[in-house]
Image (cartoon, helix red, strand yellow):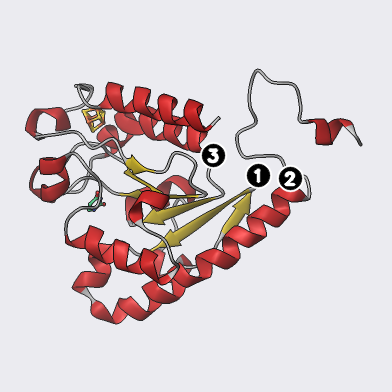
Amino acid sequence: MAQDRAAALAEIAAQVRPCTKCELHLSRTRAVPGAGNPNSEIMFIGEGPGYHEDQQGLPFVGRSGDYLVSLLKLIGLTRDQVFITNVVKCRPPGNRDPLPDEILTCKPYLDSQVDIIDPLVIVTLGRFSMARYFPGAKITQIHGKPKYENGRAYYPMFHPAAALRAQALMPQMEADIKRLQEVIAKVKDMRAAGAAPAEAPKDEPPPTQLLLF
Ligand code: URA
Ligand code: SF4
């Protein structure tokens, strides 16, 4: 399974790197498919690559990334232990917001990554990934409040760049990341108690556990 996930993610990355499906391919240096542990319990979804990400082909390697890594450290994690990606895989020129049609065109890649990793928790960083799971919500009202659905938690956090701009948000960012451990434990309990996994494997018989009941 570990091998399968890594191979499946590598296959997505191989499709993303030469992708020309939306206009963002015209101005990018490198596409940024995402990086990290294919078997991570936590998946972070940001907005889109910035300057440094575009140069290196890796997510969250600039200032926002440094800050995200410092937050992860508070809960004993490194960037390699989690999986980090973005709503759009190519840098919007001048770091403008990604457009709705760009997000929609890029969506199948992110959908596949979520299916493959099947994380216990999806942490949304910023407005555009939050909108996938909390349409119409306001981050100031819902940050740090998990939504449990189909054996998974969706957990909205401020974007690290927002906290770097408005440092008064930093204590909230720290409190929110620390709460992740409790959220993960709750999802594990839910899954152990028989909540269906968020993405049931398609071509497999039901798990033996279910057959016992
Ligand atoms: N901001 C994002 O949303 N994603 C990155 O990868 C880097 C900065
Ligand atoms: Fe393709 Fe997504 Fe890049 Fe657009 S942003 S070119 S859809 S990988």
Q: Which element carries disc 3, helix, strand or loop?
A: loop
For the residue pair 39 and 123, the one nearer the viewer reads as 39
Quadrant of the snapshot with the N terminus: top right
- Number of the front mark, 1 or 3: 3
Label placed on residue 118: 3
Label placed on residue 195: 2
Question: Label 2 is placed on what type of residue?
Answer: Ala
Q: Is residue 129 above or below residue 176?
A: above
Q: Specify the quadrant of the image occupied by residue 74.
A: bottom left
Name the residue carrying label 1. 150
Residue at 55% x, 61% y is 146
Question: Label 3 is placed on what type of residue?
Answer: Asp
Q: Position of residue 169 (x, y in %)?
A: 32, 77
Label placed on residue 208: none
Q: Which element carries disc 1, helix, strand or loop?
A: loop
Q: Position of residue 83 (x, y in %)?
A: 40, 46
Q: Position of residue 127 (x, y in %)?
A: 34, 55
Q: Please count the marks in the image.
A: 3
* Left or right, 13 with reference to 198: left
Q: Position of residue 70 (x, y in %)?
A: 31, 68
Q: Specify the quadrant of the image occupied by residue 15.
A: top left
Report, in whole angstroms, how far the alpha carbon at label 1 lies from the one at label 2. 7 Å
Q: Specify the quadrant of the image occupied by residue 108.
A: top left
For the residue pair 128 and 5, the one nearer the viewer reads as 5
Of label 1 and label 2, which has the lower sequence position?
A: 1
Is the Cβ of the residue at disc 1 closer than 8 Å to that at disc 3?
no
Q: Which element carries disc 2, helix, strand or loop?
A: loop
Question: Label 1 is placed on what type of residue?
Answer: Asn
